[in-house]
Image (tube, grey):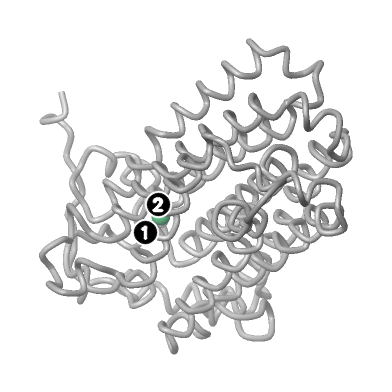
Amino acid sequence: MLSLIRFPRVFTIKQVPKVFHEESIISGYRHPRSSATDCVLSLFQLTNETLNIWTHFVPTWYFLWKLGSVALTQRAWQDAFTWPLLLLLLSCCVYPLASSCAHTFSSMSMRARHICFFFDYGALSFYSLGSAVTYSAYVFPDRWVSGAFHRCYVPIAVLNTVICTGLACYSRLGLPFVHYNYDTMKRFPECNGPRFSKLLRVLAFAYPYLFDNIPLFYRVFLCVGDGCTDNDTNVLHYNHIALAFLTGFLFATHLPERLAPGSFDYIGHSHQLFHVCAILGTYMQIQAVEQDMEARQLWLRDHSIPITFANSVAVGLLCVVLSLAIIGVYTLPLFSRNEEKQRAKSHRETSAPW
Ligand SMILES: [Zn+2]
């Protein structure tokens, strides 16, 4: 059946606009003005994005199954104690789905590429918040439970999602209307300063990750004596922390393709490995959170801040609304141009190669 389908051709780095370039990836680029159908077809054609798509699309279904099974079997809706876990599981479905959609449709146009990844960043912020809400509910060490830091931890995490989404979107194009608009959507800072842009993006995700993990790092690395919650789950926590650092390392360094540009274009480049490590880390994080939740349930119900709609589900909804608003602000100038400019641009585009 697949042999009857005519797949679109792929291109080298020199044949696509700079905004589509990936560091040390030389070939396997899709057409920078692919149709939606061609983008979907590229799931079944080996391009430099194919495994990026599948490495997040398949796990999405696993996490959806997990969410469904927890929601249906544990009477989750009646028991507020389970809501943070549901929020984390929902965020674990959203971020790989948003990522696989972004990687699928990012070659439709320059504008589509930016918008796709704006949503990808928003989904990662949501995941970061999901982690914070579950850590607050189940992972905080006994010693810190109900303390001053515990009480301001989730509100700060909400603020961090705004910073994370805003900074990550800023890292692509700069400030909307100030640095870019419809006609200059490739100026600042990604094209002029790709390293600065990358640094901002690493910062945008490293900072909320490090903040979210303050109670966990304290619990497993620093705490001594009573109230440290030194239980069997700590091994699982070590595993997902190690995978998170490996994920960040791959994202930041572009290894292994940086050592042999062109050799890992289709299989084995850092972004694919980054996706796989992120998913494995998330899988282990869920296991650890569930185990803590089970083992500490009675103690936490008696001693911790009560879990309510306001500090779990509503916080998740607020994060979604804030992230969508930020994405909207960054997206708007990509569409806004006056009629005169539109006519001039249309005239220029008739002779442009893409
Ligand atoms: Zn990705």
Left or right of residue 12: residue 155: right
- SS state under label 1: helix
Q: Position of residue 221 (x, y in %)?
A: 54, 58
- SS state under label 2: helix
Label 1 amino acid?
A: Leu
Tally the numbered discs. 2
Give the vertical position of 58 relative to 203 (above or below). above
Q: In the drawing, what numbered circle is on residue 243?
A: 2
Q: Quadrant of the C terminus?
A: bottom left
User: Which residue has dot 1 on it?
Assistant: 246
Left or right of residue 95: residue 211: right
Left or right of residue 79: residue 96: left
Q: Quadrant of the N terminus?
A: top left
Q: In the drawing, what numbered circle is on residue 297?
A: none
Question: Between residues 252 and 16, which one lies in front from this camera angle?
Answer: 252
Give the quadrant of residue 332: bottom right
Q: Residue placed at 87% from the left, 40% from the top?
A: 305
Mark 2 and 1 residues: CB-CB less than 8 Å, in contact?
yes
Left or right of residue 264: residue 306: right
Q: Position of residue 295 (x, y in %)?
A: 64, 26
Q: Residue placed at 70% from the left, 68% from the top?
A: 163
Which quadrant of the figure shows ligand 1? bottom left
Q: Residue placed at 42% from the left, 49% from the top?
A: 278
